[in-house]
Image (cartoon, helix red, strand yellow):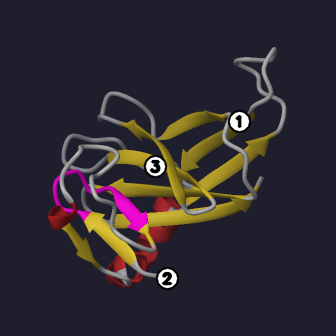
Amino acid sequence: MAIFICGMCGHIEFGTAPDTCPVCMSPREKYAQNDRVFIESEEKSKEAAIKHIPSVTISKECKLIPELSCVDIIVRIGKALHPMEAAHFIRFIDCYVDDVYVSRVTLTPAVYAGACFHLKTKGTTVKIVENCTLHGYWQMEGQI
């Protein structure tokens, strides 16, 4: 599948580049195709996988909004929790349902490397993409 990266905010689109970035509203011209972005991150830092591959827990019972029908996607970055330091941290965690972008959580070194998405979107596959300031892009998929 083709992978396009926004040159302004780092957002990834699968399949085709959008007319405008759903995160920063940059035009299509700001996207560059790199179908190997995840492979390149792993190749340049094989030992980093333990701290970068997202761990995803899917709960069909929403804890935050129990009166509504939603799915909780709980994300932890790394089997060994990723460090969050000024020079080395997770910039963002993006959530996709069936390869369609849903939402982003932006992180700073002041928080731990994790997030929770409360989805009202229906689908079959959730994909989590994260970006590390030093080690690039990493992803994990799971079934909803």
Q: Reply yes or no: does residue 117 show up in magenta.
A: no
Q: Return the x and y of residue 113 as percentages of the image width and height.
A: 46, 41
Main SS of the magenta part reads: loop
- Residue type, numbered disc 1: Asp
Crowd band around label 2 with a 10 angstrom C-alpha radius: few (<14), some (14–19), many (20+):
few
Residue at the spot of label 2 = 1
Crowd band around label 1 with a 10 angstrom C-alpha radius: few (<14), some (14–19), many (20+):
many
Compared to residue 135, the image places residue 62 above or below, namely: above
- Residue type, numbered disc 3: Asp
Could you tell whether 131 is left or right of 119 in the image? left
Q: Dot 1 lies on which element?
A: strand
Residues at marks 2 and 1, CA–CA distance in whole angstroms = 27 Å
Q: Residue at x 80, y 17 (%)?
A: 66
Residue at the spot of label 1 = 72
Count of marks placed on residues: 3
Residue at the spot of label 3 = 94
What mark, if any, has residue 108 been given in the picture? none
Span shown in magenta: 6-13
- Residue type, numbered disc 2: Met
Could you tell whether 136 is left or right of 32 in the image? right
Could you tell whether 85 is left or right of 144 in the image? left
Q: Dot 3 lies on which element?
A: strand
Q: Earlier in the sequence, mark 3 or mark 2?
A: 2
Residues at marks 1 and 3, CA–CA distance in whole angstroms = 14 Å
